[in-house]
Amino acid sequence: MNDSESARRLPDGFSVRLRADVRRPSPGVLLGGAPLRVLRLRDAALRLFVGDEFVVRDALTDRLAARLLDANVADPVITGPPANARDVTVVIPVRDRPEQLARALAPLSGLRCIVVDDASVDSAAIAEVSAQYGASVVALDCNLGPAGARNAGLAQVTTPYVAFVDSDVVVESDALLRLCRHFVDPRAALVGPLVQARSLSASPRWFERYDATASSLSRGNAGGSVQPGTALGWLPSACLVGRVGVLADFSFAADMHVGEDVDLVWRLIDAGHVVRYDPSESAEHDTRGTVGGWLGRNFAYGTSAADLAARHGGKGAPAVMSVSMAIAAAAVLLRRRWSLPLAAVGAAASGRRILPQLPVVPERWSLTARLVARGLGWAMRQQSGLLLRHWWPLAVVGALTSTSLRRMIFSAVVIDYLVWKAEHRKAPYSPVARRLDDLAYGAGLWRGALRRRSITSLLPRTPR
């Protein structure tokens, strides 16, 4: 092992635990991860486990731990002490909004904070609030946008770790210090918490209640290693903690005003770094106070897809599915007499491709059936999203003349409702808010594609 490999090795004593959602249909066979996969462990690897955990002791156990973590089959056991407050600097980009800045700074006592004033109209108000909470100010002469402002703040950081916190985000300093425990893994470059939306209104309006439940900044309750093209494909820059030594070479793309967080995460992963999501820690993000502000933000998020596609190709494709699964899912959505036979043919084709890749165990056929069923369900969910969110302009035009397309759209709405109830349980389903969310994002997606004169961001791709 050379010095570079040794420096990136997990330290001895580092513990890894299999995730609770990983199934073990037979000894040594693991079914789980993101994307879903089957792993076969040899007897030597099995003997390392005590229950669901094992401890890194050498190069062999390091490689096994890294493989399981990267596949999201296992999670690190984070038990060490939080980072020292002297080792973390918080960078807060802001343009005006002094009231929100005060709320952001209040829970960060004990940490050095750098407020980057991104050419505020009332810079005196920003300076006053910053001084009240003991934060230093970097004042920019011209507006650079959030990415450029964060880079300007990062240039002033001298501590090993930096936390990027937006001015409309509230997070406790202790949470940021605990997130730094992930950096015991030398490969980890960036860590993000659960970002929950919150309304500042005493009586939240309908769109605020929806946003608090279905904010696009929330990455869900399942943590893990971030991987492009999966359900956990990126993290929002609203709240992130990173290694200064790494980020000095991987700063935010200053020419991107939206989607710069996704771009940074993907570039880090491409370079071999690890980006982790830890929903056991949380931050609160203010919802927009008007319908126009809420829809405008979602529209802006949609426009970023074309810019990301120009930089990263199909990593951000709106759907990832095999041709056979796409045909099977479309047949189910059509709900014709021949739908089930055609779906069965597509599912059988997928199973025929999966079966040879599985370990030869007694449960091989049942594993194949389980993987095919999961794949079909995911394909139906993705196709519903394409019809209702990503391709809605085409779907609306086509539905004017096509009965089949109207049937598919109706099926997509039903699937979307069932997915909502499964993921949000007791939260009320607002069809108006849900469709407006889709319309705004989809319109932004098409606007970005037209501006770039490229449809890459609109095209699904097949899995690798």
Image (cartoon, rainbow, N blue to C red):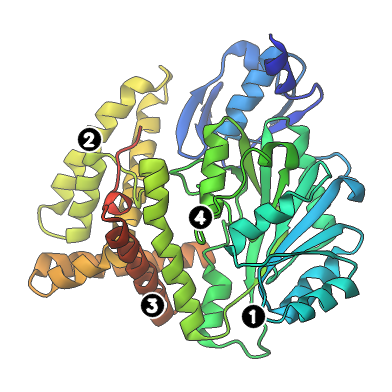
Q: What's the distance in space between the residues labelled 1 and 2, CA to CA?
A: 48 Å
Disc 1 residue type? Ser
Q: In the image, residue 14 lies at what x, y percent?
A: 78, 28
Left or right of residue 57, residue 326 in this image: left
Secondary structure under the numbered disc 3 in the rendered image: helix
Counting residues from the start of the chain, the first of labels 3 and 1 encountered is 1
Counting residues from the start of the chain, the first of labels 4 and 1 encountered is 1
Q: What's the distance in space between the residues labelled 4 and 1, CA to CA?
A: 30 Å
Q: What's the distance in space between the residues labelled 4 and 3, CA to CA?
A: 29 Å
Residue picked out by circle 3: 436
Secondary structure under the numbered disc 4 in the rendered image: loop
| Front of the two marks 4 and 3 | 4
Vertical side of 293 occupied by 87: above or below: above
> Within the image, what quadrant is residue 369 found in?
top left
The reply to whether callout 2 and callout 4 are in contact (CB within 8 Å) is no
Q: What is the crowding at mark 3: few (fewer than 14 residues within 10 Å), some, or many (at least 20)?
A: some
**Quarter holding the C terminus?**
top left
Vertical side of 142 occupied by 273: above or below: above
Residue at 56% over, 80% down: 209
Tag of residue 348:
2
Would residue 315 be visible to someone looking at this image? no
| Front of the two marks 1 and 2 | 1
Counting residues from the start of the chain, the first of labels 3 and 2 encountered is 2
Residue picked out by circle 4: 255
Counting residues from the start of the chain, the first of labels 2 and 4 encountered is 4
Residue picked out by circle 1: 199
In the image, 21 versus 144, the foreground residue is 144
Disc 2 residue type? Ala
> Within the image, what quadrant is residue 131 found in?
bottom right
Counting residues from the start of the chain, the first of labels 1 and 2 encountered is 1
